[in-house]
Each structure stands twice: as C-alpha cells, then as structure tokens.
Image (tube, rainbow, N blue to C red):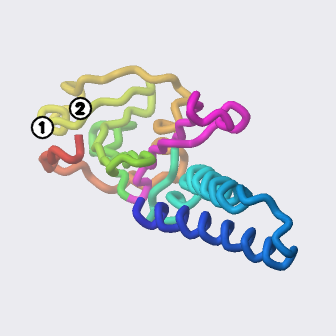
Amino acid sequence: MFLELIATIVAGVGAAGLVLLVNRLAGGRLPRWGAPVAAGAAMLAATIWSEYDWESRTRAGLPPGLHVVETVEETALHRPWTYLAPLTTRLAALDVAGLQSKPGAEGVKLAEVWFFGRWRPVRRAPLLIRCAPAAQAPVTDAALADVSAAAWRAVPADDPLVAAACAPGAPGASGALPGRAAPLSASDA
C-alpha cells in the first residue's frame, strides 16, 4: 500500500514536471492550470492501473501448488470506470499440492483454501471437500475422526473448488488426513 502511494505521487510529480518542461520549451504558451491537471490525471491513471493490476500481481506472487479457483469482480459508484470493466477485488486459491484424503472415506479430501483481498489481510481456511455428491464442511476434530459427523453443506456439482480438488490426477490420493487438525488462529477466521 505504501509503495503504491509513493508510485502515485511520483506519477503526479513526473506529469507536472513534464508539462512544466513543455511549457518552458513552448515559451510559456500553455495555460497555468496545465501542470496541476496533468498531475491529477497522472495520479488518477496510476491509481486505476494499480487497482486493475492487483489480480495479476497477486497471481504472479502465489507459490507453486496454489491454484486460483474463484475471483470476485465488483463495480462501485465512486469508480465509474468499473461499470465498463469490473474490478477484481478478491480471489480464492486452493492448495492443490497439499490436498489429502482419508482411507475409508472415499471421495473426501482435506484442503486448505487461501483468501486474498484487495486491502484485506490474507486468510486461510481448512475445508473438507466431498467429491460426490459435491459438498463442503468446516474442519473440526469430530469431522476428522469421522467424516459422516461433518456439517456438510451441499454445493453445485460444477463448484470451482470441488472441481479443482476432485479433478482426475489431483494430489491427495495417497496422503492421509491427520488425526487432529491444527486450530485456526484468530487471524485465519
């Protein structure tokens, strides 16, 4: 966030400096309001670029094994350009490399899902995912001991999280669910 603020300020100062240089070369023929307007326009453009580039920068920074399964696009009245091109402000990534399954509970996988949001802290949540019929459940000690005790919530069969976790060749066929889940910290909720 701080670096984006610095970049926005530098863009404004650079644009104002360029207009002042052009004005000097033109013999002072440009209007006096040219430099502040150029600075404001450059700062607005830098901010808009930073907002739209957030998703690609976040995806590029993901470690191997995290697969983006869902993005959330938003529009806002205070950002009228988002009605033309919606802005991605959140995404969810599945740790495909860390998928685990439990012997005797065919089609059930333990997955860790990471949630990234623009101007929000990163969160993670362990989930139980049932491939057929498609369902998700929060991880509890009771659910890890017996998956039938999990609080399953049905999801559509084409749910992107279930599709990624249950895809043919997805890891987790040999990894066993741990006997006990590590508790979530308050920052993970």
| Residue type at the position of mark 2 | Val
Q: Position of residue 66 (x, y in %)?
A: 45, 57
Q: Position of residue 49 (x, y in %)?
A: 63, 55
Q: Is residue 150 above or below residue 120?
A: above
Q: Residue at x 68, y 37 (%)?
A: 81
* Snapshot quadrant of residue 14: bottom right
Residue 119 in view (yes/no): yes
Q: Is residue 87 above or below residue 46?
A: above
Q: From mark 1 to mark 2, how far is it between C-alphas? A: 10 Å
Q: Is residue 7 magenta?
A: no
What segment carries the magenta color?
70-97
Q: Position of residue 12 (x, y in %)?
A: 61, 63
Q: Single out the residue that lies furthest toward the top.
A: 154
Q: Is residue 113 above or below residue 2?
A: above
Judged by depth in the image, the label closer to the viewer, 1 or 2, is: 1
Q: Earlier in the sequence, mark 1 or mark 2?
A: 1
**Left or right position of 31 against 123:** right
Query: In the picture, which quadrant includes the C terminus?
Result: top left
| Residue type at the position of mark 1 | Asp
Q: Residue at x 53, y 58 (%)?
A: 59
Viewer-proximal residue among 127 and 31: 31
Viewer-proximal residue among 22 and 85: 22
Q: Is residue 152 above or below residue 35?
A: above
Q: Is residue 90 magenta?
A: yes
Q: Residue at x 48, y 67 (%)?
A: 6
**Label 1 belongs to which residue?**
141
Query: In the picture, which quadrant includes the N terminus?
Result: bottom left
SS category of the residue bearing label 2: helix
Specify few, some or many for label 1: CA neighbours under 10 Å numbering under 14, 14-19, or 20 or more: some
**Label 2 belongs to which residue?**
147
